[in-house]
Image: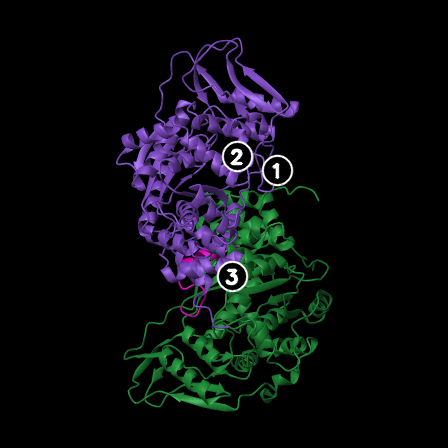
Chain colours: A purple, B green
Amino acid sequence: MTAPAFFPQDIIIRKRDGGALSRDEIDFFARGVVDGAFADYQATALLMAIFWRGMTPQETAWLTDAMMRSGDVIDLRDLPGAKVDKHSTGGVGDKVSLILAPLAVACGLKVPMMSGRGLGHTGGTLDKLEAIPGFRVQLGVPEFRAILQRVGCAMIGQTPQVVPADRKLYALRDVTGTVECIPLICASIMSKKLAEGIDSLVLDVKFGRGAFMKKKEDALTLAHAMVEVGRAAGKPVRALLTAMHQPLGRAAGHTTEVVESIECLKGGGPADLMEVTYALTGQMLILGGKARDAAGARQQMEAVVANGSALKVFREMCAAQGGDARVVDDYSLLPTARKKLEIRAGADARGFVSEVDALRCGHAIMALGGGRAAVTDRIDHAVGLADLIKIGEPVAPGARLCTLHANDEARAARAEALIREAVKFTPAPPRQEPLIHDLVQ
Amino acid sequence: MTAPAFFPQDIIIRKRDGGALSRDEIDFFARGVVDGAFADYQATALLMAIFWRGMTPQETAWLTDAMMRSGDVIDLRDLPGAKVDKHSTGGVGDKVSLILAPLAVACGLKVPMMSGRGLGHTGGTLDKLEAIPGFRVQLGVPEFRAILQRVGCAMIGQTPQVVPADRKLYALRDVTGTVECIPLICASIMSKKLAEGIDSLVLDVKFGRGAFMKKKEDALTLAHAMVEVGRAAGKPVRALLTAMHQPLGRAAGHTTEVVESIECLKGGGPADLMEVTYALTGQMLILGGKARDAAGARQQMEAVVANGSALKVFREMCAAQGGDARVVDDYSLLPTARKKLEIRAGADARGFVSEVDALRCGHAIMALGGGRAAVTDRIDHAVGLADLIKIGEPVAPGARLCTLHANDEARAARAEALIREAVKFTPAPPRQEPLIHDLVQ
């Protein structure tokens, strides 16, 4: 055994005292958390020191790169076409990926997407896809690549060989109060995305009640950090800042979100959901060289929805990943809840909806059994929210606020209470906040 | 298994955000690091957060108490007489404990002393005692108590049952850059001392080149924190701030320090060593109710040195702990180095000694094989420094700077080079800095 190039405590002390780490030190750290040269109890001391002292853009880029190289990096260079992915920092009702990937493929891109599972009040793309009977998200790289080639998009979970340093570090951060740290969040997201073999990336950085970042400034800081890391890696990255105060669309859960996603691809999606989907996919088309600007992209996307080719890609991806593509035409093939309960406004409801608190809606899904408090929890795909009322819509006594899809009465009662707390009214039409804020590039 | 009262991450986050921890949270932490409810990787994140955010005096007192209660607390209440101990933050040539304990006992106190081993450039009392053939420092509590009763003092290593939380936390701090943190240092020292069953305590908080604290302000802050913790525990504590720029006395090592300690008890000790020993022992006598002031204490101490009763206690302790008490009269029974090499000043030496760098002297002892770089290293008790020149003494070409006790020529050469770097000269007599600074109580 050769002597280690560094002692972990020297690296910890440098960061503790506010210094910047060298590329070699950061490499040693990212490799060491995987191979044990950097013990867990040393890694967490360094994570807390990073939380305290921060990291320079250069350090963040090096950490991202070192984490990416801690495992396999997928090489898709031999695959023709521009490989562009999208990542969202997560929210409630955010089923954009399910619509965006087929849409982008129908417009000529390749979308190699590795996604995550839901935790807490936020949902996860993999869980939503698994509502489709037979849909497999745990594919190896060869199958991932074959589906990408044939269909144009594939949506899978991370393989254990990809970015093991992130899996280790994320598990440690989760139990040591070091999650909410911009450079660490940035390196975690970007290392996984850059390991997918993409050419460029669009980020949906959400802020607001239902988002991980509550404040727009924090979201903006994170967006800039991620765009910067992309630049350092030679991969164009664009980030849109989007509001996540109320759930996106009118459905939240798993089956309910799959149905809404298919409706979008059929041309019947809710306005807010389509606005975010078109904005993000549009940036992908621009990065992938398929459109010159957002207006040109919009035309193409509307066309592939109208002519059914986006929906066709969805069917093909479904079938390629083992899912029952007949769900596209028959929603009853999806897991269905025993009860559908309409929640209606009380006798004092007057005026307009001023708030539909996304965080409380997320908690309502958890109350129904459709979320995870811990990563090991099982979820009920059938339950969720549909027909959700939106901010700005008029209300009167008896107006429907939402339809609960529930499998248990006591759980439904808890969810109903949360929905009633989530929805607030105001006498005058409320000011409509924009959904899409800054573009960072 | 009942649910834990706290989640470690909540405690980490509170401290991370600058909050103060509750007594229950601190108890959970100190218990949890021992029983595993607080994982090592969570403990180190909290330690770094404490390093960053600090602890209030109240939190420090609670942590000390919780650490003390993590193991056995020795109860000496049934033993007659005042039980008073002394602790030093460590230096080079600091053999005060070996002289002070017999001195205090000869003046009527009981001294239950648990000491440590040397690490890096600082020596440890246990290692010095083990230079005496047969001397056992690993005694159980019943034997410790019996010797205390019969002899009046006993000097042993920590038993594994005493303050296990400190052993665990210290090992973690050592490898995570969280050593130099006043509240953690304070709790580490005080929890061990309060677990000894003492009535009161005198602290020697050293600062300077050869001390753990380089700056006097830091030493003063630590002294105040420890006195405060003693107050909270209902145990009077007094701290003396003493300078540790040059080694204490003229000997450093193990055999050489035992010889010098016995010389002190015989009345022939170097002035600086006796000054510090009398000052610290005097405070013990005041706390133990044996003297009204430093002058009265000094009279008593000089008397027990002059009439041989302090030396008699040393002999008795030696014999009680299995050591060969004949070393008192025959130093050749101690481990003896093969070579004694005098280091003499060069042809350009003129004027006075302005500096004898204690840190370099400590490194010289390590170079000779008489120190530990890692806790598992073995040490050579025979090697060390004797006849060390002191700051302010006149020099001329050929003046003796020091006598090296060495077992290896190459090692001796390295040590000589370090001693030559350590000793500096000045044409005019240098300003003599006081040895004893503040008394904190």
Q: Is residue B368 above or below residue B186?
A: below
Q: Main secondary structure of the magenta part?
A: helix
Q: Specify start and end residues of the magenta stretch as a single range.
A: B209-226
**Horizontal side of residue B316 vs A35, given as left or right:** right
Q: Tag on residue A378?
A: 1
Question: Can residue B337 be seen here?
Answer: yes
The front one of A369 and A256 is A256
Q: CA distance from mark 2 to mark 1?
A: 13 Å
Q: Position of residue B427 (x, y in %)?
A: 27, 80
Identity of the amino acid at label 2? Lys
Specify the quadrant of the image occupied by residue A377.
top right
Q: Badge 2: how crowded within 10 Å, few (<14), some, or many (20+)? A: many
Question: Can residue B224 be seen here?
Answer: no
Specify the quadrant of the image occupied by residue A274.
top left
Q: Tag on residue A35?
A: 3
Q: Position of residue A289 (x, y in %)?
A: 29, 41
Element type where label 3 sits in the image: helix
In this view, the residue farthest toward the left is A292
Q: Nearer the viewer, mark 2 or mark 1?
A: 2
Q: Position of residue B231 (x, y in %)?
A: 56, 51
* Residue A304 inside the magenta-drawn segment: no
Label 3 close to label 2 by CB (< 8 Å): no
Where does the N terminus of chain B fall, quadrant-wise?
Answer: top right
Q: Residue at x 41, y 24 (%)?
A: A267
Q: CA distance from mark 3 to mark 2?
A: 34 Å
* Residue B213 inside the magenta-drawn segment: yes
Q: Earlier in the sequence, mark 2 or mark 1?
A: 2
Identity of the amino acid at label 1? Arg
